[in-house]
Amino acid sequence: MNCKKMDIKPFEKRVWLSSPTMHGDELKYITEAYDTNWMSTIGENINKVESIAAEKANVKYAVALSCCTAALHLCVKSAGERLYGKPSIGHGAVEGKRVFCSDLTFNATLNPVMYEGGTPVLIDSERDSWNMDPVALEKAFEMYPDVKLVVYAELYGFPGNVRQIKEICEKHGALLIEDAAEAMGATWEGKQCGSFGDYSAISYNGNKIITGSSGGCLLTNDIEVVNKARKWSTQAREDAVWYQHEEIGYNYRMSNVIAGVVRGQYVYLEEHIEQKKAIYERYKEGLKELPIKMNPFDAEKSKPNYWLSAMIIDEGYMCKQVRNDSVAWYTPENGKSCPTEILEAISSINAEGRPIWKPMHMQPMHKMHEFVTRADSGRANTNTYIEGGCADIGMDIFDRGLCLPSDNKMTEEQQSRIIDVIKACFE
C-alpha cells in the first residue's frame, strides 16, 4: 500500500468517526431524575426534551421515544392510518402498499415501512446533494401514481432540496415522512430539517450531533398524532382503571434518565455544529490538491450540521476495487486510490473511517424491491447512462466515496496527520 510507505506514527488513543461529546450539565439532570426517583418513562426531563425539541425544530409538538427508529415506526403507522384507515389486529398500517423511500440511507429508514407491511420503492440520489433526487421521485410517481407516502432521509447532516420533495408530494396528494436523524440543526432556506415532513424523526443515538446514548423524537404539528404516538408508545393502554388493550402497542417511551442526558446536551447543539463545520473546512482545504470532492451542498440554500465529513474520489483516479457482500479487494496503482485503500490507511494510524452507506437497492434484503432512477427503472436498465455519467448515482457514490473521522474532539494536529495519510494514498 503506497500510503503505508510514509512514516506516520499511529495515535495512542483512537480517533473515532463520531463519538459522544459530554460537558457535565448532563449529570445535573441525571442526578435530578435519581434524587426525585423519576427513573422510568415519565418525569420533568422528558417534558423538557419534548418542549426543547419542538422549539428547536420549529414544530408544535415532539414525542420523546426510545430511539429514532421507534419515532419513524410511529410516523409510518400514523401516516398509514391517516391514508388507509385503522388496520385490523395483525395487519400493518401500510399493508400491501408501495412506499417511496430514499435509497442512499441506513436501513433504519426502511425497516419501519416493512414493520407495517409496506413495500419500499427505492428512489435514487441526486449528485448535487447525495439525497433523494426530485427528478427520480417524479419518475416514480409516473410509474406508480397510486403511491401516497414518501420517506425521505437527509444524509450525513447535508440537506437536499427537501422543499421541492415536499412540493412534489403535495402535487401528488402524498404524505411526507422526513427522516432527519442525521440532520438535527441543519436548515434548508432557513427552515429547520425535521419541520418539512407531515411527520418527522430525529435521533439522539450515541454518534449523533448531540446524544442521550440513545433516544429520538417524533416531530409533528398534529396534536392527534401526538396523542396516538404517546398511547402506542406505552403499550396502547386504554383509559381504564385496569390494563385494557384494544390495539397493538409498543414499549417505546424515552426514559427520564436518558432524557436528562439529552436535556443537558441541547444547549451545545450549535457549538457542536460549529466544531463539525471546522472539521469539514479543514478537510476541504487540506485535500484541495487531490482528485476528490467533499460532501456536496447548496451553499446558498442549505446550512448543514456537518455531522460526518465525507469525500468521493474523481472517477479517473480510482484504482481497481472489487467488493462482495462482506469483503473488499483493490489493486494499488500509482497516482490513484480507492475507498478501501484509504480506509485501511486511516485505520493503520488508529483512526476510524467508514464506507458510505451501501444503497438499499444493493442490499440482499431489498433485491426484489423496485429501484427508480431519473432515467427509469434501475432494475430494468442497469447499464443506463445519463448526462454526467451513470444513472445509478447511489451505487456510484458508494463505490467511490467514504466517511472521514469527524469526531469534534479530534485536534487539528490529529486531523493534519489523517490528511497526510490520505494524500500518501495518491502518491
Image: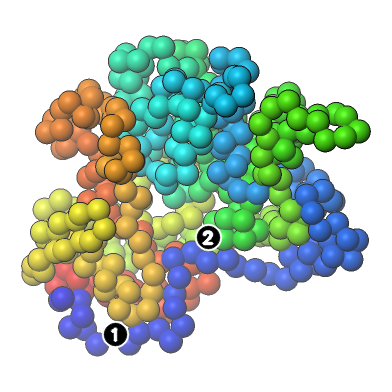
Q: Looking at the image, which is closer to me, 425 or 271?
A: 425
Q: Quadrant of residue 273?
A: bottom right
- Residue, x 74% and y 65% (percent of image)? 26
Residue 84 in view: yes
Residue type (three-letter) at the residue carrying disc 2: Asn
- Please provide percent x and percent y for residue 66: 65, 49
- Please provide percent x and percent y for residue 152: 46, 33
- Residue, x 20% and y 76% (percent of image)? 3
Residue type (three-letter) at the residue carrying disc 1: Ile
Q: Quadrant of residue 332?
A: bottom left
Element type at mark 2: loop
- Please provide percent x and percent y for residue 73: 57, 36
Q: Is residue 93 left or right of residue 238?
A: left
- CB atoms of marks 2 and 1 within 8 Å: no
Q: Quadrant of residue 105?
A: top left
Judge whether 312 appears above or below 107 on screen: below
- Name the residue tied to disc 2: 207
